[in-house]
Amino acid sequence: MPPKSTPREASPLRVVQAAVQSRAFEPVYYLFGDDDFLKEAAVRDLLDAAIDPSTRDFNCELRRGGDLDAETLGSLLATPPMLAERRAVVLRDVTALKKAARQQLDKYLTRPASDTLLLLLSPAGSKADTALTNASVALDFAPLTPERVRKWIAHHASTVLSMAVTDEAAQLMQQAVGNDLHLLAAELDKCASYVLGVQDAQRGNAGANTDASDPSPESAASIDADAVAAVVGIRRGETETDLLDAVARHDAQAAVTLVPHVLGQPKVTAVQVVFMLATQAFALSYGRARRDSGIPTNRLPQEFFAFLKETGGYPGRPWGEAASAWTKVTDQWSADACARALELLLEADLALKDTTVSNAEQILMSLVLGLCATRRRRAA
């Protein structure tokens, strides 16, 4: 009988890790979902663990569904391993198989070979194939939540780069780059090279005075916030999160100062900032309503978690950090101030789509000033 599919709630990363550590592999894995980076990383881990490197050229086939006919696919799946315990077939874009080839695959899946590791992949954006899900160990690689991205940064640095990352550096990196794992991996690689370069220079300057018992650059290497600032071009106190917090506490001077710094960061746009400010404004409006209904302040973090889960809004940071920040300022926002903030955000969104008069930075400057002024409007 074919293996049962993995429950959706099971972490695909843990399933892969368990297989790699135990060296016990199911005959067929079906990898789907919207995070192609994690899928490709899982394929690499499974192949590295399952296939002997010395015979990999003979025992590893990488193909695409649209390029295979039924005869070729049948031959690939029927070929035994050569001078090894196991062979692997990686079939990308599996849902692009033509009818005859798909029938050949479905027939194979009823009795998959125990000495072949078959990895079936669907690209991001495609719907999961129910038949493949039921006939394999199905791994749904959904994008990581912001909280898990923070943990992934530390895991990737330690396992791939053999380097530690400070909590402050991981936070700054995520704030600068976002949750795109491709970009994060590239920036982490740059940071690692920068750190090792700095350490090599320091050891060179020390010369003969260096104690032989000192740790090597590799063993002592750690990516800190200074390294992230030097490589990525973002400094403490100048992130999108800092701008959001300044607006939330009605600090116009800090908010206006931060606008050009934030817009100068890689891949940050005014539209993106307005979207995060809108998420924050909706959250504060929700929090204000909950407070007015009698919910105590210490219950607000749970309320904000429920809000984010229900709406799917992106707060620009992990949910726990966002909930904590909003809880601190909710009582500074009246219902009228929240309503006015949403009006200003809508106006800014429309203005950014028609920039015949003002540029994006001017629009964002006017927006944050208006948002910060809502407190004075309430007092008046």
Image (spheres, rainbow, N blue to C red):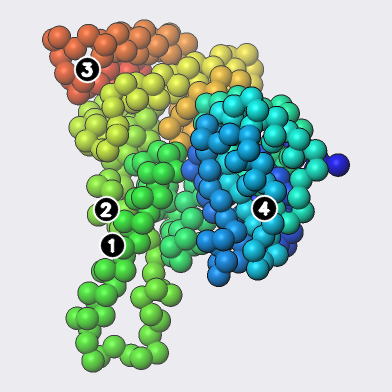
Up-down relation of residue 199 to residue 329 (above or below): below
Q: Is residue 80 left or right of residue 143?
A: right
Whole-number angstrom distance, CA of label 4 to CA of label 2: 48 Å
Whole-number angstrom distance, CA of label 3 to CA of label 2: 29 Å
Up-down relation of residue 211 to residue 227 (above or below): below
The numbered mark, 1 or 4, whose residue comes first in the sequence reads 4
* Residue pointed to by mark 3: 363
Secondary structure at numbered mark 3: helix
The numbered mark, 3 or 2, whose residue comes first in the sequence reads 2
Picture residue at 61% right of the left edge, 62% below the top: 51
The numbered mark, 4 or 2, whose residue comes first in the sequence reads 4
Q: Nearer the viewer, residue 270 or 320?
A: 270
Quarter occupied by the C terminus: top left
Q: Callout 1, which amino acid? A: Tyr
Q: Callout 4, which amino acid? A: Thr
The numbered mark, 3 or 1, whose residue comes first in the sequence reads 1
Secondary structure at numbered mark 1: helix
* Residue pointed to by mark 1: 194
* Residue pointed to by mark 4: 79
Up-down relation of residue 291 to residue 152 (above or below): above
Q: Callout 3, which amino acid? A: Ile
Residues at badges 2 and 1 in contact (C-beta under 8 Å)? yes
* Residue pointed to by mark 2: 231
Residue 320 appears at what percent x and percent y? 55, 37
The numbered mark, 2 or 1, whose residue comes first in the sequence reads 1
Residue 15 appears at what percent x and percent y? 69, 49
